[in-house]
Amino acid sequence: MKIPVMFYVAITTLLLVTLTIMVAMDMPLNWVFYLTCLGQVLVVVMAYKVLRDRYVTDKTFEDFYEDHPIGKQKITS
């Protein structure tokens, strides 16, 4: 079973946001320390998984941004 890459991104993000909230609430230092160490390991694992993912797209820089497509335009000087 292949775990999707976005799962690693979501878990790492949730852990680090939780860690930030714990620091703001003055949680005990040992909890914060261990979660910080776990978060650093998860960041490395996440980066490895994202960079090694076999993602293929047909988009190019000429397509601009996906959230605001402007269509292909010819640049003239």
Image: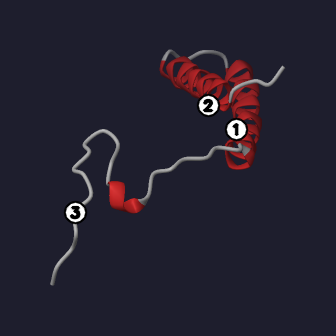
Helix, strand or loop at mark 3: loop
Asked whether the residues under the numbered discs 1 and 2 touch, taking CB atoms below 8 Å apart as contact, a structural biologist would say yes
On residue 46, the disc is 1
Give the residue type that dot 1 points to.
Met
Q: Is residue 77 above or below residue 35?
A: below
Name the foreground residue: 51 vs 14.
51
**First of labels 1, 2 by sequence position:** 2
Spatial CA span between label 1 and label 2: 6 Å
Give the residue type that dot 3 points to.
Gln
**Where, by quadrant of the figure, is residue 23 drawn?**
top right
Name the foreground residue: 31 vs 16.
16
Mark 3 crowd level (few <14, some 14–19, many ≥20, 10 Å Cα): few
Q: Which quadrant, please, contains the C terminus?
A: bottom left
Query: Residue at point 69% right, 49% down?
Result: 51
Spatial CA span between label 1 and label 3: 36 Å
Q: Is residue 53 left or right of residue 9?
A: right
Q: Is residue 42 left or right of residue 65?
A: right
Q: Is residue 11 above or below residue 49?
A: above
Residue under pointer 3: 73
On residue 9, the disc is 2
Give the residue type that dot 2 points to.
Val
Residue 40 locus on image (x, y percent): 71, 38
Residue 11 locus on image (x, y percent): 64, 22
Helix, strand or loop at mark 2: helix
Helix, strand or loop at mark 1: helix
